[in-house]
Image (cartoon, rainbow, N blue to C red):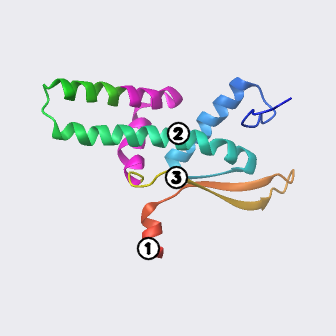
């Protein structure tokens, strides 16, 4: 029985699923949009949003750190928390340049937003095997302001 078990197995072992999520998330952060199946996109969404939430926390800590003096114990604590958050993100990608991009560029866009950082747009069926395809993209806050 699968009572209260969240997520889909995607017909693969755990290690392959984790590797798939990490690779899809990497591509999403590098390019902004990816085309994948609807099931994979729905599985990837919570993974990406948790990473962005951690990056937002690291960004706010960095902003707080700029107001503190460098030698104070509060500043040292903020530095260590910032480093810990960046290492948690790096655990998924093992690429410091990508972590820097996520924390310094991507997370800054979403500082005032409380979730909903990604969008899934369905495309239709794939020709070869009739899988339902979708575009997973990062939502841009500038786009929303222009439409208003």
The mark nearer the N terminus, 3 or 2, is 2
- Asked if residue 95 is among those painted magenta in the image, a careful observer would answer yes
Which residue position holds label 1? 146
Q: How far apart are marks 2 and 1 (CA)?
A: 27 Å
Give the magenta part as a residue range: 84-109
Local packing at callout 2 (Cα closer than 10 Å; few below 14, some 14-19, many 20+) is some
Q: Which residue is depicted at the point 40% across and 31% down? A: 86
Position above or below: 13 against 115: above
Which residue position holds label 2? 50
State the image coordinates of residue 15 (x, y, percent, origin top left).
69, 24
- Look at the image and tell me in which quarter the N terminus lies: top right
Local packing at callout 3 (Cα closer than 10 Å; few below 14, some 14-19, many 20+) is many
Foreground: disc 2 or disc 1: 2
State the image coordinates of residue 116 (x, y, percent, origin top left).
54, 53
Q: Is residue 17 left or right of residue 147?
A: right
The mark nearer the N terminus, 2 or 1, is 2
Q: Is residue 130 left or right of residue 9?
A: right
In this view, the residue in front, 80 or 1, is: 1
Outermost residue to the bottom: 148
Which residue position holds label 3? 117
């Amino acid at each position: 029985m699968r009572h209260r078990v969240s997520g889909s197995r995607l017909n693969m072992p755990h290690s392959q699923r984790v590797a798939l999520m990490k690779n899809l998330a990497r591509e999403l952060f590098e390019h902004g949009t990816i085309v994948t199946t609807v099931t994979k996109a729905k599985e990837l969404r919570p993974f990406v949003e948790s990473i962005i939430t951690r990056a937002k926390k690291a960004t706010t800590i960095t902003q707080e750190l700029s107001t503190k003096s460098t030698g104070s114990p509060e500043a040292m604590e903020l530095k260590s928390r910032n480093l810990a958050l960046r290492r948690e993100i790096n655990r998924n990608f093992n690429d410091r340049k990508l972590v820097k991009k996520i924390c310094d560029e991507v997370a800054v866009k979403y500082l005032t937003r409380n979730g909903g950082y990604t969008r899934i747009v369905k495309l239709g069926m794939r020709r070869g095997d009739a899988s339902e395809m979708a575009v997973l993209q990062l939502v841009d806050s500038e786009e929303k302001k222009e439409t208003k």
